[in-house]
Amino acid sequence: MSNFINNHPKRPQFRRIGLMGRAGKSSVVETLNELIGLLNARQLSVVIDTETAAIDGILIDFDKIDGVMLKIVPRQKMGEHCDLVIVVGGDGSMLQAASVMAGTDVPVLGINRGRLGFLADINPEDVSEKVGQVLDGQYWLVERFLLKFQIVQNDEQGSPTDEVIHEDVALNDIVLHAGKSVHTIDFKLKINQHDVYRQHADGLIVATPTGSTAYALSAGGPIIHPTLDAICLVPMHPHTLSSRPLVVAGSCQIAINIHKDNRTQPMVGADGKASAPLENDQTLLIAKHDKTLLLLHPDSYSFYEACRTKLNWNLYSEEFALDK
């Protein structure tokens, strides 16, 4: 379940700050260097993962790496060395960080150097002010749940066994899709072992509240407030006019089977990562993961403001004005 944890005036301040960034954009380098300067000025320990440290243009004095004020560690080990991790990039960079930081109880703060930035919500021009507020203890924490999927082998009766063929986790969504094929997928859906439907569609998006503003939104799914304990199932171009997105409890167990008459090779992927094939004699199982991600937002953060600004809800058009 996603839970907000209210700001408290006596909240301990962060002392060991991790930095993650994505190579390939000069704007990311610019913000990372600004953060390094800000943290050094506050005499805080800076922890940088090896991938970020290797980015051209990062202002790191390798002669001053002392393991206390400046440390470089493998990305998978960041949770062991930080009190807070700041990610510079877009939502894709935040998803990558989520796969590393989930279950560590170390909060993640995002600075948007991508396009929308629903997860990375600090704008580059506000870095000094907003990050300064966070370092002063003015922030919100929110716990976001993840989904886990498993592709398991079926027995001779068609029931899933304990043999796991492939598994992965997602903060945003798990997507059943047709890969490069132009054919629809013929699949059957069960929730908590109850038959739901047999569907012909380009695929199915199974999204968390966090992912409801991502791919699921593009496919016509609902926006789900991040505090809700819910899972959304959004068919992709279903071959019926009556098919609609379905929102179920976060505790639900979802099972998907490919029908024997299916003519294409279905694939399954999590958060846009490499997909795995799903065969007719296998079952796709989806449920809430036992690990959660702790996101940190500045004290002024508002989910509705994020929707207004990032989805252009606040655009004003003269031709639609009622007070002409």
Image: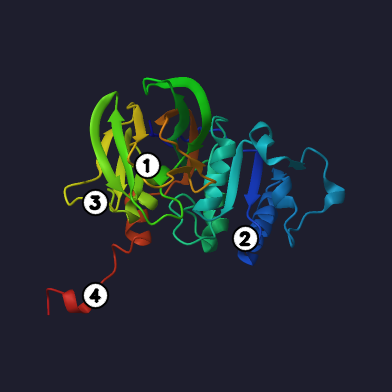
Which numbered disc, 4 or 3, marks the residue that appears first in the sequence? Answer: 3
The residue that mark 1 highlights is 207
Asked if residue 187 lies left or right of residue 282, the reply is: left
How much space separates mark 4 and mark 3, taking CA atoms? 36 Å
Which numbered disc, 4 or 1, marks the residue that appears first in the sequence? Answer: 1
Position of the C terminus by quadrant? bottom left
Query: Image point 54% across, 30% down: which residue?
Result: 103
Q: What number is the disc on residue 239?
A: 3
Which numbered disc, 4 or 2, marks the residue that appears first in the sequence? Answer: 2
SS under mark 4? loop
Q: Amino acid at mark 3?
A: His
Q: Amino acid at mark 1?
A: Ala
Task: State the image quarter where residue 250 is shown.
Answer: top left
Q: What number is the disc on residue 28?
A: 2
Neighbour class for label 4 at 10 Å: few (<14), some, many (≥20)?
A: few
Q: Amino acid at mark 2?
A: Val
In x, y percent, where is residue 52? 69, 51
